[in-house]
Amino acid sequence: MTIMIPAWVNGTLQPVEKLEAHQRGLKHKAVSVFVLNRGRVLIQQRALSKYHTPGLWANTCCTHPEWDEDPTDCTLRRLDEELGITGLYPTHRDQIEYRADVGNGLIEHEVVEVYVADAPQTLRIAPNPAEVMATRWVDFYDLSADMTRHPEHYTPWLRIYMQDYQDAIFGDLMRAV
């Protein structure tokens, strides 16, 4: 299945096939979601079948909106498709742009709409094995410390978020814990 995502080509936003956007390192739209519960972050380990960064730990959910798809609608769709999570209402926190080598000659150059969602203790998670091989709740500060010790276990974008944008994404949410 060909997925067309919004990417900038010669200064104009155009639909581009997702893999091509990564091969060419085109700046493109993305969304990232962080599901939180009492100072813990839900992270996912990417399926080994993913064409980049397989087996690495990432934030709860991240993806590319399809051409003309609203970013908020995209977050809800992908939370359900990747993790079987429904009934959450993510809040927009920030827009972040980054560029990262994700291996195999692929580049993520993303303009990311970042969302957070508070989850109840009873949150039902049903990972799609084609997308996610594992999930875990991790204390925010333990995640930060482990990422410092073992950066190779985490996706480049999660490392960038935690290193450069931690306050913009989490800010008062983590201080309230």
Image (cartoon, rainbow, N blue to C red):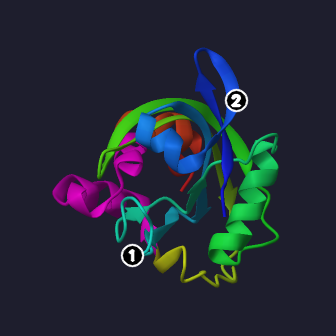
Quarter in which the N terminus is drawn: bottom right
**Crowd rating for badge 2 (residues with CA inside 10 Å; few <14, some 14–19, many 20+):** some
Residue 14 is marked as 2
Task: Identify the image quadrant of residue 51.
Answer: bottom left
Mark 1, secondary structure of its residue: loop
Residue extent of the magenta highlight: 137-162
> What residue appears at the point 37 percent right and 41 percent down from the top-left corner?
160
**Crowd rating for badge 1 (residues with CA inside 10 Å; few <14, some 14–19, many 20+):** some
Q: Which residue is mark 1?
A: 48
Q: Main secondary structure of the magenta part?
A: helix
Point out residue 130 in the picture as x, y percentages from the top left corner: 54, 79
**Eye-nearest disc, 2 or 1:** 2
In this view, the residue in front, 157 or 16, is: 16
Residue 140 showing in the rendered view: yes
Point out residue 93 in the picture as x, y percentages from the top left corner: 65, 38
Position of 133 relative to 138 (above/below) = below
Mark 2, secondary structure of its residue: strand
> What residue appears at the point 70 percent right and 47 percent down from the top-left corner?
65
Point out residue 116 in the picture as x, y percentages from the top left corner: 65, 51
> What residue appears at the point 66 percent right and 79 percent down from the top-left corner?
121
Is tag 2's residue or tag 1's residue first in the polypeptide sequence?
2
Point out residue 100 in the picture as x, y percentages from the top left corner: 35, 38
Task: Identify which amino acid the numbered label 1 is placed on.
Answer: Leu
Task: Identify which amino acid the numbered label 2 is placed on.
Answer: Gln
Q: Is residue 130 within the magenta segment?
A: no
